[in-house]
Amino acid sequence: MIKKVLKALRHLNRYFSKYKVRLLLGVVIAITSRVFAVAVPKFVGDSIAIVEQFQKGNGGTKEELYHQLLINIGLIIGAALVSGFFMFLMRQTFIVVSRFIEFDLKNEVYDHYQKLSSNFYKNNRIGDLMNRISEDVMKVRMYAGPALMYSVNTITLFSVVLSYMFSVAPKLTWITILPLPILSVAIYFLSVAINRRTTVVQEYLSRLTSFTQEAFSGILVIKTYQTEHKTSNDFDDLSTEHRNKGLQLAKVQALFFPLMVLLIGISNLIVIYVGGQQYINGEIEDIGILVEFLIFVNMLTWPVATVGWVSSIIQQAEASQKRINEFLQTPADIIDSNDAVDIDAISSIQFKDVCFTYPDTGIKALQKISFTVNEGQSLGIIGKTGSGKTTILELLGRMYDIDSGEIQINNIDIKKISIKSLRKTIGYIPQDHFLFSDSVNNNIAFGKYDASKDEIIAASKQASVHENIINFKNGYDTIVGERGVTLSGGQKQRISIARALLKSPSLLMLDDCLSAVDTETEKEIIQHFQKMTPKPIQIIVSHRISSVKKCNSIIILESGKALSSGDHKALISSNSYYKEVHDKQLKQKDS
């Protein structure tokens, strides 16, 4: 079991090595604290022995007795104060280190999350991801801090106390510590049960977190369909299961402290009975030794109790670290090659017989797609839902890697371009226009943190949303709510467009991002795109012919295949599907 736990928690060794100086200092402080703590029972025992000798007529005068007792009292208080001071320093050392490790581990998990592909997030629930970076890391911190501190404290105290006890009364010491092996066996079996039940509790907590996160995010849908009662019942069922699993864990954990008290009580009885007989038989000369042993046994009460508590913490940390390791050991699908190069801008894009299948569903999204777009040009992509339009944009941003064929950027294989520099040159406006629960100003500036107010306003005007923003109660300082819940669909789309334009990208990708605006606003935004200087490469995915008709080239997709391509005029005259969609949308506009 120990090897298993050490294996699971071995990931933390790098952090223990990083803070080894602080930890070694903590060990030295712990030893110092325990040495002074052990001096207290010794002075108490000496005081009892002095009184005993006085009663036998061997202790001098009362004044000398009082003087010696006052000295011992001063030594007891002084040793206790010094021990307490060093214990304070010990806590500061170990607990602070555990906070540092918690900080480092959270950042490691978060950094790794950001490296993982879109496919990873499709297969894992957000609530579970949140739980692993919060609750699971907290459990691990308890192992790196309190558990480590009390382990060092317990080992130090046992070493110092038992060494002294054996030097004074070896036989009595052996009998006194007899209950400890029983304790060790009990801890082993309880720890196994705790580990198993802790894993289950954490899994249910992840489910509960995921459920509540989804419920809060979809509260409008829940209210619209009047499913509050059902949702509440589902939450109650899940919460009840989590409570029951927690209670099962608590029942096992609750066995620790009664067991500790029982065993310590037995040790006290052994000291009184066996030690008393040894004193009567003359094997122990001073009654003060019995008092010392009683104090020592009770001093060991909390350390012995912490053996079970620490074991419980380690088991919980092991279960949590396992869950963390599952994600940390998940390899990133999209990574830079060893010879990756940086680019400053995108001047050309070329797809050569590109094929791609989504790994999670097995759907063939693209089949032998080829096209070329050069600097200053625009490409329109239209097609039915599921035809592969969005997939082309995701491949350009290297959210996925292709199965076969080749994508070239500036005549360089996209896999040989560093991901950071590639995405830095792209302005992407997805279908799911995600806004953060922040001000309008900060949501737009998300595309360029150091943007000036004038730059933000200019981007808003290009996206035809400036007039809307200035009419808000607090203008650009208006808080949009989670996911932009206080805004209309068209306003959210245009703020997303402004965010992308603020970057001044050399490649602008629009994924049906004008669907929620009226045709006049759409026309205005398209005109702004045409006037941009320098003009970026534009790839516009849309269901509306009006959004792509000004593009230099238009591709029609169906089931991942390119049926036809050309400019608007050529497709109107040569492609029946394109002309049919165009005429239908034109009639809808006129009506």
Image (tube, helix red, strand yellow):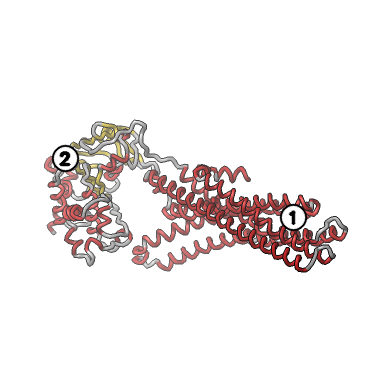
Residue 436 lies in what quarter of the image? bottom left
Front position in the image: 516 or 111 = 111
Judged by depth in the image, the label closer to the viewer, 1 or 2, is 1
| Residue 109 numbered tag | none
Task: List x then y, in percent, for residue 236.
Answer: 49, 65
Q: N-terminal of the two: label 1 or label 2? A: 1
SS at mark 1?
Answer: helix
Report crowding for label 1: few under 14, some 14 to 19, many 20 or more residues within 10 A (C-alpha).
some
Tell me if I can see residue 449 in this picture: yes
| Residue 221 on image: x %, y % | 35, 63
Is 510 on the left-hand or right-hand side of 82? left
Horizontal side of 329 relative to 466 (left or right) equals right
**Label 1, label 2: how many angstroms apart (C-alpha)?**
83 Å
Q: How many labels does the image show?
A: 2
- Residue 88 coordinates in the image, percent (x, y): 56, 57
Depth check: give the residue in front, 360 or 43.
Answer: 43
Instruction: Name the residue carrying label 1.
Output: 179
Residue 382 shows up from this direction: no
- Kindly identify the amino acid type of the residue bearing the numbered disc 2: Gln
Q: Residue furthest right?
A: 281
Look at label 1 and name its amino acid. Pro
Which structural element holds mark 2?
loop
Task: Report the residue marked by disc 2.
Answer: 377
Crowdedness near tag 2: few (<14), some (14–19) or many (≥20) residues, C-alpha within 10 Å: some
Rendered residue at 84%/65% (across/down): 57
Q: In which quarter of the image is the C terminus?
A: bottom left
In the picture, residue 365 is in which quadrant?
top left
